[in-house]
């Protein structure tokens, strides 16, 4: 994280370090909060706040695969409160130990809360001396409480480690990267509008869920990820993608991915914001395009339908960050992206007909078309500046007063995408003509 972003939380971190040594709190007297969930309450200006805290005595093997059973190592309680401080105070009357937020990994907002605005919660979070800027944020489709209740790590024993691995993945592009520090910085500085990963739950039948799942379902007030009862876009996300970019893959959203699994929680897709309020959601494929455009894409497998009948799978790596060129005279923004790739599947007769150069040209065209479609279908209608165009536009002015007069112009500019794409390893031996 850049120093300027971390500065928003610096005072809190210093205070947390001082308090740990001066307040006389022994580790055995503390219960460490792993995650927090916020759902709307029936009472105005209140939240149903779910607190998930660790039970260290049930964790063995230092969180490795060989230690513990993965069950019963966290406890979930839900209290009704107007803010984090009040919720923690109420929970302290229930839990025998003092709750500490110093090791929190995740904060989940229900979609209802996200649509109403999370600015107040984030302001409170930033002022808490225990919280860190690297806490992950997510939006739950349905109930945040239900998501936390249904987290059952399959490989990792420790849920804190599970959250870190899920929300910090660098080798998949189906979720965006954003932390509490990033969110707060973007919101206050106006650098760009925020995006958050989507979290959801899978509805399993009785045989799959078992008795534990039934008991937890009774404790939760959420209705799960019923596509008919959430966002309209959910109904479209399960349809098969017949476009040439990521051909035949489904545009999944959290809660729709797995058919059969032990862990009933999923993370896939993203929610994009306008200010501090959710403006809409996208599935995994559009999230992948966002990561490419913003520069968060590192590497992933892509399936491209080139020509008319040949599907090609490649491992794509970002060669360098995308470049944004702003032409004020012609009111145009050009985004140039740079990718390298390794071929992983290729029809046997493809090279004979098109050659490597033909495939590279077709790949450039498909990634370009998909990116521009995402910009025109998602970003423009919402007015959400998730690409940070305004902050880049600001560099065109010599003073802030002049920028403030024209800052909204950039959102009406034409946006063109250019893709530099080359194959670095074919995995094939190409014979010269006549051999």
Image (spheres, rainbow, N blue to C red):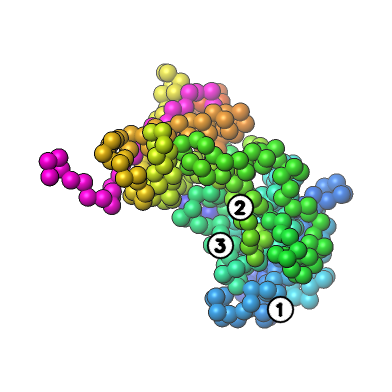
Instruction: Left or right? Give the position of 358 relative to 27.
Output: left
Q: Is residue 379 magenta?
A: no
Residue 157 vertical position relative to residue 150 in the rendered view, above or below: below
Can you give x and y, in whole percent of width and height, for residue 27 in the image?
Answer: 65, 78
Q: Residue furthest top?
A: 329
- Identified at 62% across, 47% down, the residue is 253
Judged from the image, the secondary structure of the residue bearing numbered disc 3 is helix
Instruction: Left or right? Give the position of 237 relative to 96.
Output: left
Can you give x and y, in whole percent of width and height, for residue 114 in the image?
Answer: 70, 45
Residue 428 visible: yes
Residue that numbered label 3 is attached to: 164
Quarter of image, res 67? bottom right
> How many residues crowd around disc 2 within 10 Å: few (fewer than 14), some, or many (20 or more)?
some
Residue 335 vertical position relative to residue 186 in the rendered view, above or below: above
- Measured in 3D between alpha carbons, the distance from the residue under mark 1 to the one under mark 3, in whole angstroms, is 25 Å
Can you give x and y, in whole percent of width and height, for residue 18 in the image?
Answer: 61, 69
- Identified at 64% across, 73% down, the residue is 70
Q: Which residues are magenta?
A: 411-435
Can you give x and y, in whole percent of width and height, for residue 159 in the image?
Answer: 62, 67
Residue that numbered label 1 is attached to: 29
Judged from the image, the secondary structure of the residue bearing numbered disc 2 is loop
- Measured in 3D between alpha carbons, the distance from the residue under mark 2 to the one under mark 3, in whole angstroms, is 20 Å
Instruction: Left or right? Give the position of 353 relative to 2.
Output: left
> How many residues crowd around disc 3 within 10 Å: few (fewer than 14), some, or many (20 or more)?
some
- Identified at 59% across, 62% down, the residue is 163
In terms of depth relative to the viewer, which is nearer, 105 or 145?
145
Mark toward the viewer: 1 or 3 = 3
N-term-proximal mark, 1 vs 2:
1
């Amino acid at each position: 994280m850049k120093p300027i972003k971390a500065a928003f939380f610096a005072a809190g971190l210093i205070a947390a370090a001082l308090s740990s040594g001066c307040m006389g709190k022994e580790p055995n007297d503390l219960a460490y909060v792993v995650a927090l969930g916020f759902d709307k309450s029936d009472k105005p200006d209140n939240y149903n706040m779910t607190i998930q805290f660790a039970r260290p005595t049930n964790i063995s093997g230092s969180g490795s695969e060989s230690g513990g059973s993965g069950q019963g190592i966290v406890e979930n309680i839900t209290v009704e409160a107007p803010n984090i401080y009040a919720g923690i105070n109420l929970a302290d009357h229930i839990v025998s130990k003092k709750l500490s937020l110093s090791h929190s990994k995740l904060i989940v907002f229900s979609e209802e809360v996200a649509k109403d605005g999370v600015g107040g919660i984030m302001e409170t979070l930033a002022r808490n001396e225990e919280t860190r800027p690297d806490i992950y944020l997510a939006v739950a489709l349905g109930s945040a409480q239900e998501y936390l209740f249904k987290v059952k790590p399959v490989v990792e024993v420790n849920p804190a480690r599970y959250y870190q691995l899920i929300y910090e993945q660098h080798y998949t592009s189906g979720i965006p990267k954003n932390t509490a520090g990033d969110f707060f910085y973007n919101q206050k500085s106006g650098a760009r509008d925020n995006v958050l990963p989507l979290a959801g739950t899978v509805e399993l039948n009785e045989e799959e869920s078992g008795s534990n799942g039934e008991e937890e379902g009774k404790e939760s007030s959420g209705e799960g990820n019923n596509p008919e009862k959430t966002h309209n876009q959910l109904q479209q996300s399960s349809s098969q993608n017949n476009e040439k970019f990521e051909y035949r893959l489904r545009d999944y959203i959290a809660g729709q991915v797995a058919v059969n699994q032990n862990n009933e929680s999923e993370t896939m897709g993203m929610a994009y914001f306008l200010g501090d309020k959710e403006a809409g959601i996208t599935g995994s494929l559009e999230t992948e395009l966002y990561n490419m455009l913003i520069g968060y894409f590192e590497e992933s497998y892509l399936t491209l339908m080139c020509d008319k009948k040949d599907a090609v799978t490649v491992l794509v790596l970002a060669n360098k960050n995308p470049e944004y060129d702003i032409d004020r005279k012609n009111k145009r923004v050009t985004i140039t992206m740079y990718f390298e790739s390794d071929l992983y599947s290729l029809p046997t007769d493809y090279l004979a007909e098109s050659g490597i150069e033909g495939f590279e040209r077709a790949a450039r065209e498909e990634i370009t078309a998909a990116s521009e479609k995402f910009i025109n279908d998602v970003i423009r209608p919402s007015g959400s500046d998730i690409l940070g165009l305004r902050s880049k536009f600001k560099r065109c002015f010599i003073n802030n007063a002049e920028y403030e007069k024209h800052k909204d112009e950039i959102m009406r500019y034409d946006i063109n995408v250019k893709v530099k794409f080359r194959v670095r390893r074919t995995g094939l031996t190409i014979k010269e003509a006549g051999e």
